[in-house]
Amino acid sequence: MIVRILGEGRYDVPEADMPAIEQLDAQLTDAMDREDEVEFDSSLADLVGQVRRSGVQLAADDLQTSGLVVPHEGSSLAEVRTLLNEGA
Amino acid sequence: MSSVMKRLSGIVQAKANKALDKAENPADMLDLSYEKQAENLQKVRRALADVATAKKRLELQAAELQAQASKLQDQAKQALAQNREDLAREALSRRSGLADQLTELGTQHSQVEAQQQQLETTATRLSTQIEAFRTKKETLKASYTASKAQASIGEAVSGISESMTDAGMTLQRAQDKISQMQARGAAIDELIDTGALPDALGGAKDDIQAQLDATSQTGQVDSELAALKAELGSAAPAAGLPGASPGAESTGPADPSAPAGGGS
């Protein structure tokens, strides 16, 4: 699965590592639903770290599209909420 | 409710597709897309210059506030030396206000650095990607009549369009942060300008310095006055015996003989 971290680039993550990433994505989503900023910040940092660790960064001249997108590193809950509302 | 990563992916794809809808035939799509990429790269580079300016400004403001804080510290010492505890207290309390501002500036500075880092990464990757796209574009255009090529064009354009969308979102985020900081920076400048914070160079607006100077002047006047009093004080006993001291002085040498004469 190709995962994009906004402002950073795309990573090719092996399918075997996807459950760990999905788990962190669920934590992030839960933190956002509960408006828990502390939990949100730490889940996002963990998620960004996990994608970087398990994935291989695609070369900049590769033009493949991604299947999942991680918010910018260090984004606040409010910022991500605004981004998600843009599509609503 | 879908997860954050899935929803965000949907938004990025939607934005990327929206950017594509404008072109009608594949060849135009390639050229338009390329032009747009070049424009976006320019925007990212301009934003990088803005970030550098914002960072510099924060550094200058921090240096100025730091200088004012040291000055207030000196003034507090001076005030205590002059027994003006009230002034020393005032100086220290203003200094503590500055310390809060400095902490805030420090936080902003690290935020600006993070933005700078992300934009630099974006600019570097984008420029490589655009170059790769340009090469691919010419190859695809040369053979785009083949139905297979149409699909390849679609993929390449979608790929670059997604990256453009990411760059656009990163740019927007950086610009939002910069304008927040500019607003806050302007407020600090205004605070410095209106003298709500004492002038670093000790201008007329620096009331603590004015009071210290006044106290110091008063102190000087007091000590001169005391010196004068002392001078007058030493002359006073002499004035109380007019003629006595000149007489004593003139008869001084005769004194030993006088008591002797008086005694005999």
Image (cartoon, rainbow, N blue to C red):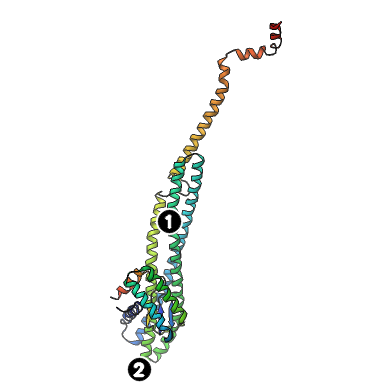
Q: Position of residue B236 (x, y in %)?
A: 55, 20
Q: How many other residues sit within 10 Å of disc 2, few (<14), some (14-19) or many (≥20)?
A: few
- SS category of the residue bearing label 1: helix
Task: Give the distance between the C-alpha atoms of the residues marked 2 and 1, in whole angstroms.
Answer: 63 Å
Foreground of the two, B166 or B133: B166
Disc 1: which chain? B
Identity, as a three-letter code, of the amino acid under mark 1: Gln
Instruction: State whether residue A75 appears in this view.
Output: no
Q: Position of residue B9 (x, y in %)?
A: 35, 80
In this view, B144 is above or below B264? below
Q: Quadrant of the C terminus of chain B?
A: top right
Closer to the eye: label 2 or 1: 1
Task: Tell me if residue A36 can be seen.
Answer: yes
Q: Which residue is at 32% across, 74% downward?
A: A84
Residue marked by disc 2? B147
Q: Quadrant of residue A49?
A: bottom left
Taking the image as shown, residue B29 lies to the left or right of residue B221, namely left
Q: Which residue is mark 1?
A: B101
Q: Quadrant of residue B247?
A: top right
What is the x, y in percent for residue B97? 42, 52
Q: Which mark is residue B20?
A: none
